[in-house]
């Protein structure tokens, strides 16, 4: 087997499995005689370990995604791969863009981690392909992003919270629980979580504003340029795939990471709103957006800690302080 894992420090959050473990997974999926020709780890993801695997006798390579060991997962990121798998029936509206699940295994019988084998999407990762086009054509890409987000956000759910639960009857309960989980994770990482707890307290005190959102809608949680595929040869950008949908949640669509990123800059991404439509600009919606931004900042702080970016972790406290000043 041609096995090419990403080399990482022993203390890094992501840790590769062995060539033998990749072979064992493929034998479970494709049969006891299956032989892995190559397994190349893809380094673009920051949570799961992802491999492009070629198996003898299979027409196309497949994607093998392996979750972190259970003991390494934060409370706020618990069993994300299982959450993605459970969300697929609700994502039928974009099913032509999603990879097909070939096999998923939560038993830990082969390796001590959850794993999923998926079909290989056609196209080129958007960060690698978009720059090939002149910027005058980039609005077409963001317009498609807006259309995809609008389709997903139209899907109604049974209760608020992650698809696999826990579920909440009100949006404020879900938001406060999420903030409390992030604070607990920061505690476990040895980081100061006082500001996140202050945001949770503000959200709880003003729960009526959050609870103006009464209908749970599907949100992708992490959909932006990094999780899109583009056609390799079309004269303008054409999205051919969407992947890594493990942070799906029943929520207020305005709380989605996609909306945050679409609002982040005044540039070609403004075309996103052409297809998505305008956001609610009421005083209550603006206040809720600040709570959502605080929650994003808490999650970003955890990710920066996981990646060993101490300076970026420190910077998050100033940004959170500014938000708390606006919320008070």
Image (spheres, rainbow, N blue to C red):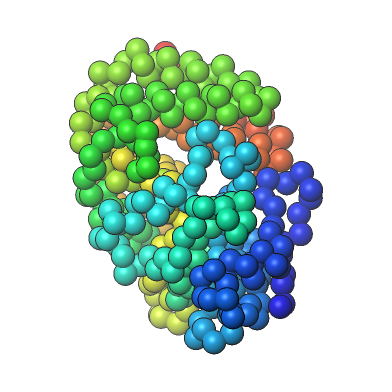
Residue 215 appears at what percent x and percent y?
A: 20, 36
Figure check: 317 above or below 57: above
Position of the N terminus by quadrant: bottom right
Camera-side residue of 170 and 38: 38
Figure check: 203 above or below 3: above
Camera-side residue of 180 and 26: 26
Would you identify the image quadrant in which residue 98 lies?
bottom left
Q: In this view, does 28 lie to the left or right of 222?
A: right
Q: How many marks?
A: 0
| Residue drawn where x is 24% and y is 43% of the image | 157
Position of the C terminus by quadrant: top left
Q: Is residue 219 visible?
A: yes
Q: Can you name the residue that lies furthest to the right here?
A: 10
Residue 135 appears at what percent x and percent y?
A: 46, 66
| Residue drawn where x is 47% and y is 79% of the image | 232
Camera-side residue of 280 and 71: 71
Residue 245 appears at what percent x and percent y?
A: 42, 54
| Residue drawn where x is 62% and y is 67% of the image | 24
Q: Can residue 282 be seen in this view?
A: no
Figure check: 9 above or below 321: below
Would you identify the image quadrant in which residue 173 lies?
top left
Would you identify the image quadrant in which residue 242 lies?
bottom left
| Residue drawn where x is 50% and y is 35% of the image | 76
Residue 281 appears at what percent x and percent y?
A: 26, 33
């Amino acid at each position: 087997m041609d096995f090419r894992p990403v080399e990482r420090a022993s203390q890094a959050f992501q840790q590769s499995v062995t060539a033998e473990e990749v072979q064992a997974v493929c034998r479970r999926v494709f049969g006891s005689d299956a032989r892995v020709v190559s397994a190349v780890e893809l380094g673009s993801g920051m949570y799961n370990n992802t491999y492009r695997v070629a198996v003898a006798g299979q027409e196309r390579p497949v994607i093998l995604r392996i979750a972190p060991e259970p003991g390494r997962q934060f409370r706020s990121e618990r069993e994300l791969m299982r959450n993605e798998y459970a969300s697929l029936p609700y994502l039928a509206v974009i099913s032509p863009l999603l990879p097909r699940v070939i096999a998923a295994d939560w038993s830990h019988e082969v390796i001590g981690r959850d794993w999923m084998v998926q079909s290989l999407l056609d196209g080129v990762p958007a960060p690698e392909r978009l720059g090939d086009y002149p910027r005058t054509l980039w609005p077409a890409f963001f317009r498609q992003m807006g259309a995809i987000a609008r389709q997903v956000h139209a899907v109604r759910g049974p209760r608020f919270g992650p698809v696999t639960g826990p579920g909440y009857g009100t949006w404020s309960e879900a938001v406060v629980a999420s903030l409390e989980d992030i604070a607990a994770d920061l505690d476990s990482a040895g980081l100061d979580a006082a500001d996140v707890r202050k945001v949770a307290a503000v959200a709880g005190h003003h729960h009526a504003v959050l609870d103006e959102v009464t209908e749970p809608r599907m949100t992708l949680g992490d959909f932006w340029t990094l999780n899109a595929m583009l056609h390799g040869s079309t004269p303008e950008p054409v999205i051919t795939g969407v992947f890594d949908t493990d942070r799906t949640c029943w929520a207020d669509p305005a709380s989605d990471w996609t909306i945050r990123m679409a609002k982040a800059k005044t540039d070609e991404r403004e075309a996103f709103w052409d297809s998505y439509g305008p956001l609610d600009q009421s005083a209550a919606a603006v206040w809720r957006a600040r709570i959502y931004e605080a929650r994003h900042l808490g999650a970003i702080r955890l990710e920066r800690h996981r990646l060993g970016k101490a300076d970026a972790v420190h910077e998050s406290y100033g940004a959170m302080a500014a938000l708390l000043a606006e919320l008070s």
